[in-house]
Amino acid sequence: MWSSIKSAMEYSWRGELCFITDGTEERSYSADNLNELEDAPGFEEPITRVCLYKGPLDSWLSRSNSSSSSKLSHMYIVCKSQSWYWSIEKHADKITLQQSRTEDTVKDYFSRVLRHGVDTGKVTKPEETSVMGGKTIKQLLEWLCLELEKTYNVVECNCQDFAHDTFNYISNRKRGCHSFLLPDVRGIFRVF
């Protein structure tokens, strides 16, 4: 029974990265051909700022007054490099990387459509921000190859888990937001 429930929560994961440039050109890549993006403009630039955003999952949730509507949310990352802005997010079928010269294009829009909650002010400021240097978009792509192997699951591997993991990877943090306790073989609990 658990396996049928679990498979129902995994949706239609394709293991692809969809790359959208300046809100116009859209192309999908698998882990096998993701290296084709390495020579694209901006991929060698260091990431100078990363922000974690949270917004409503869908328009009906943003109109809902129920207590569950505030708990159900979509999370995504917005980064700045020297010349570009980027957003990275996981959906039920793929990971999307958007690139633009303007921040609003990647922060307020997803695939050329205004994000839910932007027009009502529910997505206005980041949940968390980190200013740093070091990692490049190219390095992020290498890390994303591993993430493409992780099937979307609404409970165990969703957009919130992905956004926190991506934020922590870019900002060189340990997985603090979602740390959990597991017993080791001696029965002593340790934090991961």
Image (tube, rainbow, N blue to C red):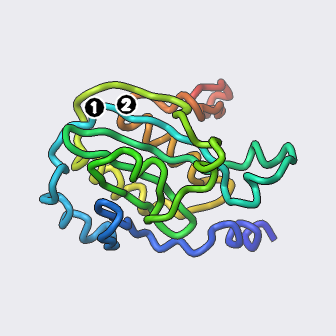
Res 154 → quadrant: bottom right
> How would you rate the neighbour count of disc 2 (Cα within 10 Å): few for under 14, some for 14-19, many for 20 or more?
many
Which residue occupies 18% across, 49% down? Answer: 42
Residue 25: give x, y in percent of width and height.
Answer: 29, 70
N-terminal-most mark, 2 or 1: 1
Foreground residue among 136 and 175:
136
Q: Are marks 2 and 1 in contact (CB under 8 Å)?
A: no
Of badges 2 and 1, the one in the foreground is 1
Residue 48 bears which disc, if any?
1
Residue 47: give x, y in percent of width and height.
Answer: 27, 37
> How would you rate the neighbour count of disc 1 (Cα within 10 Å): few for under 14, some for 14-19, many for 20 or more?
some
Residue 17: give x, y in percent of width and height.
Answer: 37, 65
**Image position of 64 (left or right of 57):** right
Look at label 1 and name its amino acid: Thr
**Image position of 6 (left or right of 46):** right
Residue tagged 2 = 171
Res 29 → quadrant: bottom left
Foreground residue among 44 and 67:
67
Q: Secondary structure at mark 2?
A: loop
Extreme residue in the front direction = 119
Query: CA gap, disc 2 to disc 1?
Result: 10 Å
Q: Is residue 175 above or below residue 112?
A: above
Q: Is residue 67 above or below residue 157?
A: above
Residue 10: give x, y in percent of width and height.
Answer: 63, 68
Looking at the figure, which quarter contains the C terminus? top right
Which residue occupies 33% across, 71% down? Answer: 26
Q: Secondary structure at mark 1?
A: strand
Extreme residue in the right direction = 66
Which residue occupies 17% across, 42% down? Answer: 45
Look at label 2 and name its amino acid: Ser
